[in-house]
Amino acid sequence: MKIFLFILTLIPSLSNLNAQQISKFIEGKVVGVRDGDTIVILFDEKPLVIRLAHIDCPELKKKQPFGAAAKKFTSDFCFGKIVRVENDEKFDRNQRLIAVVYNENGINLNRQLVKAGLAWHFRKYSSDQVYAQLEIRARNNRIGLWSENNPVPPWDWRKPKN
């Protein structure tokens, strides 16, 4: 029992070790795309999960409309390529680094997803007006998920249905 408790005390410091190794700008090869707003890069010879900041894409696992399209867009944009990751050295509750991802041409993936109508501006965690304006434009032009009559935001889609 004492060994188990000792190991539990080590877990927070192990996760903090990652945060100490991350600087504001890092680069890595994209080795996985979990869904539209989550990728895995190879950083320092280890996988690092990145959660795209400012946005929330439709749910892939819960089969939300446009979830598969968002994943495909992200995969086409960056899978197998070197990306630059800009972050505030913060991780979410799932230990994913929250960041903005740029391809080799300096194009912002996070913004491109909103512009393509494949993500919502995640206002709960972002007040960035560029994302707000991109979402308004996509809505007005009925692009991507905005072509649906009443698209459901992912944060509502994730809620248990009674």
Image (spheres, grey):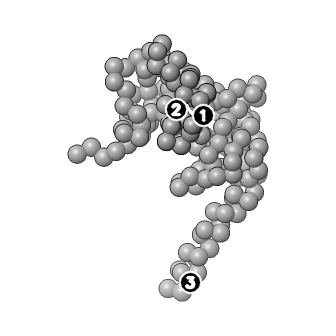
Image quarter for residue 78? top right
Report the Cα–Cα distance between label 2 and label 3. 45 Å
Q: Mark 1 points at which residue?
A: 128
Task: Estimate the x, y position of residue 63 in percent, counting from the top left.
Answer: 38, 34
Q: How far apart are marks 1 and 3 (CA)?
A: 46 Å
Tag 1–tag 3 contact (CB < 8 Å):
no
Vertical placement of residue 64 versus 139, above or below? below
Secondary structure category for the residue under label 2? strand
Expressed as whole percent of the image width and height from the top left, the position of residue 79 reads 65, 33
- The residue that mark 3 highlights is 3
- Report the residue that reaches farthest toward the top: 141
In the image: residue 102, left or right of residue 11: right
> What crowding class fits label 2: few (fewer than 14 Cα within 10 Å), some (14-19), or many (20 or more)?
many
Task: Count the marks.
Answer: 3
Q: Distance between the residues labelled 2 and 1?
A: 9 Å
The tag earlier along the polypeptide, 2 or 1, is 2
Does any portion of residue 9 appear in the rendered image? yes
Q: Which amino acid does label 3 sit on?
A: Ile
Q: Which amino acid does label 2 sit on?
A: His
Q: Where is residue 76 in the image (x, y as percent from the top left)?
A: 61, 26
| Label 1 SS | loop
Cβ–Cβ under 8 Å for marks 2 and 1 = yes
Label 3 environment density (alpha carbons within 10 Å; few <14, some 14–19, many ≥20): few
Q: What residue type is labelled 1?
A: Asp
Which of pointers 1 and 3 indicates the residue nearer the eye?
1
Residue at x 60%, y 34% (from the top left corner): 128
Residue lying at 53% horizontally and 81% vertically, measured from the top left: 5
Q: Which of marks 2 and 1 is in front?
A: 1
Q: Mark 2 points at which residue?
A: 121
Mark 2 or mark 3, which has the lower sequence index? 3
